[in-house]
Image (cartoon, rainbow, N blue to C red):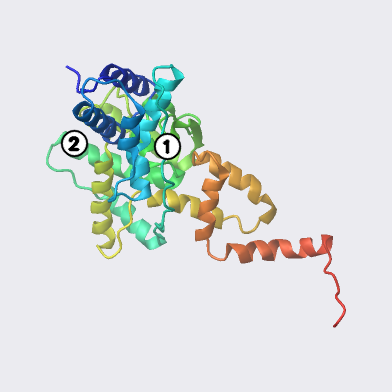
Amino acid sequence: MSIYKSGFSDCVERFVNYRKASGSWNEPNHGLNIKLFDHFCAKNYPGKELCQEMVDTWCAQRKTELNRSCYTRTQVIRNFIDYLRKRELTKAVSVTPPKPEKSKYVPYAFSREELLKFFYACDSIVPYKQMRQSWLRKIVCPVFFRLLYSSGIRTTEARYLRREDVDLTHGVLNIRKSKGYDQHYVALHTSMTKLLRKYDRTVNKLQPNRTYFFQKADGTHYTRDWIKFNFAALWIKANGKENRPVAYDLRHNYAITNINSWDCDAFGFSDKLTFLSKSMGHRWIGATLYYYSFVPNLANIIREKTEAGFNAIVPEVAYEDE
């Protein structure tokens, strides 16, 4: 029995199935919001086909919403409208959403000592009796969080990573499930490749023929809540409760650490920025440039490395005294 109740529920079903089949569906977000929209239409416009009034009413920004919240809530509805219009199934048009506010979040600046303590805590997990899931946690956590730290991939990309997409021979990840669903490849450090090989051999004894590279005991991928809980628990155990970073900060750390290492080759910044942007799965280089604001004294470094050459090419103009 369908969970959709509106007069256009069959279109909703087809849209959802299409997005799921294409691998571009986020059930906690998209699934909830399309269902709420469908039930809203069923209650207020019983039996009616999709019309502009429904879209306008639902997508209007609420008094309690920030721009970003409204943008997120209505995103799947805009996708649904676009899907129908491409197939000439509706005359309704998408509503332009409010522009999301700029994020004010500042990534956590890890110290070397904090990271050493954190990974020591990962390596020191004691499994609870003979529980299979507990033994998997001991095996998975040290490798999962080291992969985030050493490659800069998103937590979602690591969770959805399939075994077939991990090239343990050449040390390359094929990232299919990504933000914006842009497929890209990530080359791993040789030490990380060796660790993944060891992990694969070990976990394969417990989970032969698994689908996901990091797979739960029930055969599904790990959840956001699993990452959130385990990272927080291990961080508190290692470094206390005073500072509370999140797992995604390891991605920020990867970008900033890479940029910090470029200070001896100012003229190679463009190429290196491009490589970093592609590796991190950014669609636009501008997204990678965001991290420059967190690199200490970067402007001074660039000026120091390039000022002499610039002045030689474009000599300073001598002005007469007034």
What residue is drawn where x is 21% and y is 30%?
Answer: 44
8 shown above or below 218: above
161 shown above or below 231: above
What residue is drawn where x is 51% and y is 37%?
Answer: 187
Instruction: Write down the residue under mark 2.
Output: 133
111 shown above or below 78: below
Q: Quadrant of residue 138?
A: top left
Tag 2's secondary structure?
helix
What residue is drawn where x is 61% and y is 47%?
Answer: 272
Dot 1 or dot 2: first in sequence order is 2
- Residue nearer the viewer, 120 or 243: 243
Q: Residue 71, how many percent across, how many down?
A: 37, 42
Residue 299 falls left or right of residue 198: right
Tag 1's secondary structure?
helix
- Counting labels gives 2
Q: Quick check: can you spot residue 269?
A: yes
- The residue lying furthest to the left in this view is 129
What residue is drawn where x is 45% and y is 45%?
Answer: 152
Residue 318 falls left or right of residue 39: right
In what quadrant of the picture does the C terminus appear? bottom right
**Residue type for callout 1:** Lys
Q: Mark 1 packing: few (<14 Cα in 10 Å), some, or many (20+)?
A: some
Instruction: Write down the residue under mark 1.
Output: 179
Q: Quick check: can you spot residue 24?
A: no
Q: CA distance from mark 1 to mark 2?
A: 28 Å
Q: Residue 236, how many percent across, how many down?
A: 25, 58
Disc 1 and disc 2 in contact, CB within 8 angstroms: no
**Residue type for callout 2:** Gln
Residue 272 falls left or right of residue 26: right
